[in-house]
Amino acid sequence: MALDPCHFDSFFFCYLTFFFVIPTAGRNLLSEQTNFILTATSHISTTELWSLLEQVTDPEVPVLSIIDLGIVRDIQTGPDDAVEVTITPTYSGCPAMDVISINIRLLLLEKGFKNVTIKQVLSPAWTTDWMSEAGKQKLAAYGIAPPNPVQQVCNVQLFAEEEAVACPQCGSFHTRRISEFGSTACKALYQCNDCQEPFDYFKCH
């Protein structure tokens, strides 16, 4: 049976609309939305940038943001969508800093900042005093003993006297140090003598 030309025209029109017009319009709309996001969010305040960087987490302790850790020391913005972020490693040679720098850069580029500079400074040296109280609570909930408020043992020797560290599982101070270093260099490995659970202690320094 021959196809009615009117029906053929309708079919062809629907075909073009479905496969070409709608996808093209969708791509244009998506492009306009993306451009709007990039241009609208690139002019945010420094205060908003500090809040934004809470999305960047420590790859070694993902429960903590870099704001919780206190490694972000300064944020400066400039013309032409420029931003400079100054960070300090928890210790010299920390391997996580490269990943953190990349993640900061990717986040800011996503938000429309075209000129992103990540600067690392070693002085003054990072200290656990820079950690937020919220970050310390997150550590304990994660199963890592947070640093003590004040370093209880001050000794220049490598294997110094053990600090009294509360077990993050049961809260007991009846604990002992198994190793000076835990899963990372900034932590020590402890074990609770009461519940027998091993745990990392984020060393106070």
Image: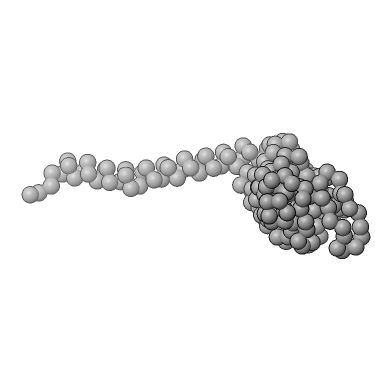
Mark yes or no: residue 119 visible: no
Can residue 14 be seen? yes
**Is 50 above or below relative to 124?**
above
Q: Nearer the viewer, residue 73 or 151?
A: 151
User: Relative to the observer, which residue lies in front, 31 or 121?
Assistant: 121
Answer with the quarter of the image where residue 76 lies.
Answer: top right
Q: Does residue 170 appear left or right of residue 162 in this picture?
A: left
Which sits in the foreground, 66 or 127?
127
The percent coordinates of residue 13 (x first, y second) are: 26, 43
* Left or right of residue 182, residue 26 in this image: left
Q: Residue at x 91, y 54 (%)?
A: 154
Q: Position of residue 130 (x, y in %)?
A: 81, 45
Quarter where residue 51 is shown: top right
Residue 176 on image: x %, y %: 77, 56
Furthest toward the front, the residue is 194
Residue located at (82% from left, 50% from top): 164
